[in-house]
Image (tube, coloured by chain):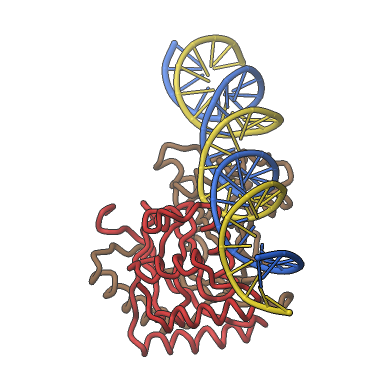
Chain colours: A red, B brown, C blue, D yellow
Amino acid sequence: MTDAPTHDVAAKRLRSIGQRYTRGRRALVDALDGAENPLTVEQVREVESSLPQSSIYRNLAVLEEAAVVRRITSSDEFARFELAEDLTEHHHHLICSDCGSVVDFTLPGEVESLVDGALISAARRLGFTGDHHRLDLVGLCSNCS
Amino acid sequence: MTDAPTHDVAAKRLRSIGQRYTRGRRALVDALDGAENPLTVEQVREVESSLPQSSIYRNLAVLEEAAVVRRITSSDEFARFELAEDLTEHHHHLICSDCGSVVDFTLPGEVESLVDGALISAARRLGFTGDHHRLDLVGLCSNCS
DNA sequence: GACAATATGAGAATGGTTCCCGTATCCAGA
DNA sequence: TCTGGATACGGGAACCATTCTCATATTGTC
């Protein structure tokens, strides 16, 4: 189960784009919040078996638009979803290039700020408006190595 | 046109996995090497209009398996391809979250080594065998902002 | 409680990518 | 240079994660 604050933020963000915070959408937020790592649609179905596939896809898209959920791509063919970082904490992904599994990890604050600074100046140089960075480590998970 | 060394390396890597370095594959390497940024299959077709789509897909997969080409995913639905980093140089991507375009950039060496060190220790902690990192900046390109 | 608007969900459609298979090309040995 | 066997090519069919459709159910409002 998810903290009330998370649900409150989700409800507010949905409302701000003219969407309701329905039972199915709450179930998705609970599923993602209860997971250690980003989930595929199939994994969401395993956790919340009552949700039909089409609703999962549609509502994940709505939640993504409301900035409640972030979609990430791995090395396999399945999209994965996690709660937005400001609802959890800033983190990164270990991506297995063999099986596509994704595991979260964090880096020391000094590293983060150095990276951010470097990215901001690179973006400025190229006329790009940076929103967030995405620092993943690609390799082999303990199962596949 | 691509340096001989690049073609030599490509030929050797293909040979090492029992594949030939054919005309079509050479054309793909030329196309990717001549591009400023990673290319979609459609963009490859624009550059090398003689190559049929099915051959582009098949040969990019072969070149990827031979570690001559790397496949990257953006925010849109198209896969993009670039030469492996040891045939070009280590770099990162600015990814436009609106149109999906991808632009290369590089970071100062100190930042790279700090990041690498931090990633290595994080990977060790989680039983992961790191291969390479992937540091992208997601935002809006000058066209979309 | 009734109405209008929005969300749901089962199945169809979409489209980037992969696969199939008959043909063309390449390489080794003679 | 020929020949045989293996590999690559390429047009089109198949695949499958995802998106779309639309009739029904649910929601919020007066």
Residue ID at (65%, 76%): A18
Q: Tell me where residue A88 sits by quadrant.
A: bottom left
Q: Nearer the viewer, residue A103 or A118?
A: A103
The residue drawn where x is 57% and y is 80% is A13
Q: Is residue B6 above or below residue A38?
A: above
**Tally of marks:** 0
Q: Quadrant of residue A142?
A: bottom left
**Image spot of residue A67 (x, y percent):** 55, 76
The N terminus of chain A - image quarter: bottom left
Q: Position of residue A38 (x, y in %)?
A: 40, 65
Q: Nearer the viewer, residue A114 or D30?
A: D30
Q: Position of residue C27 (x, y in %)?
A: 49, 28
Give the residue drawn at x 45%, y 73%: A83
Q: Is residue B79 visible?
A: no
Q: Is residue A56 visible?
A: yes
Q: Is residue A123 above or below residue B22?
A: below
Q: Position of residue A118 (x, y in %)?
A: 50, 86
Q: Is residue D23 left or right of residue B57?
A: right
The residue at the point 36 percent across, 88 percent down is A109
